[in-house]
Amino acid sequence: METIARFGELCGEGPVWDPEPATLYWTDLTGNRFFRYRGGVAAEIHRGLEICGFRLDARGGFTIANSGGVWHWDGSGEPVLIVSEAGGSLLKINDCTADAAGRLIAGSKFYQPAEPFERGKLWSVGTDGRATVLDDGFELPNGIGFSPDSRTLYFTDSTTRRIYAYDYNLAAGTAKNRRVFVQVPSDEGLPDGLTVDAAGFVWSAQWYAASVVRYDPDGKVERRIPLPAKQTSAVTFGGTDLDEIYVTSAAQSEPMPLMPPGYDWRNGLFGGEVYRVKVDVQGRPEHRTSIGVPPR
């Protein structure tokens, strides 16, 4: 394991690997900063834009998601809004991914632990920029990913400590038959960002638990990789052979009622670094959206 970046991200999130050129991108969603790691050099490349989740777009630039909706961004200028609401519901997005057909799959978040809050939804934003609801009733939507054959969609609801699985129809863009894939025990951390490797195993960053957990296709723990940062937030595969995991973390301590027993939210290394770990399995390139710039 090695540290490849140390910018003190308040809430480092959403790492995405671009094979050409070999580049890792990630965001500080609280600090409104955007970063890149290329050729052994880490750099802040943009500041002042909230990016909660994002994906590379096949038509150039990025599809980004934040509290104001889903946008197209060229990487430097002002983002162009794709969609912010549908059917009277706001797309206040926390995390996202892309499916193999170029749609953006994202979860909306309204969680306020001290007061009543609106339940979040699982959204699909099609290549035409239109948003539809795949499912709803979630507390804190987080990491999303697909099985290698795109027939299973994984979706995290952090505060319930659950990773769900759905039957996914790629041609129709529909998700059905929700079931609990993993129920994380209350004495562990909260499941956060996730990715899926080439063998169909799910890798989940555990917030509060200083670790990344690999689950087999039946939802059983296959391995646990410890990390220095308590608030590990997201994980992706990268490197020339996609046999490295990159893990983001968050420096700003975020105490919540669901902290595991004995967790010290006042002391210790919470995060703010990006880690790279060489592993003995191979990942897959993340899908790109095909939404592009909407007509003005």
Image (cartoon, rainbow, N blue to C red):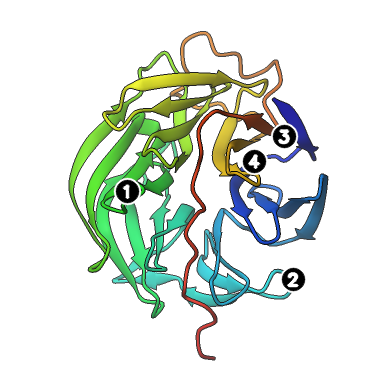
Q: Residue at x 49, y 19 (%)?
A: 224
Residue 153 at x, y = what percent? 31, 49
Which quarter of the figure is the N terminus placed in? top right
Residue type pointed to by label 4:
Cys
Spatial separation of the CA atoms under disc 3 and disc 1: 29 Å
Toward the viewer: 65 or 254?
A: 65
Residue 31 at x, y = what percent? 71, 48
The earlier-in-sequence mark between 2 and 3 is 2
What residue did someone put label 2 on? 76
Horizontally, residue 130 falls left or right of residue 250, namely left
Q: Which mark is residue 272?
A: 3
Q: Is residue 98 above or below residue 262?
A: below
Specify the quadrant of the image occupied by residue 122.
bottom left
Horizontally, residue 213 falls left or right of residue 217, namely right
Q: Secondary structure at mark 3?
A: loop
Spatial separation of the CA atoms under disc 2 and disc 1: 33 Å
The total of numbered circles placed on residues is 4
Mark 2, residues whose alpha carbon is within 10 Å: few (<14), some, or many (≥20)? few
What residue did someone put label 1 on? 119
Q: Which mark is residue 49?
A: none
Q: Secondary structure at mark 2?
A: loop
Q: Which mark is residue 11?
A: 4
User: Of tags 3 and 1, which is closer to the observer?
Assistant: 3
Residue type pointed to by label 2:
Ser
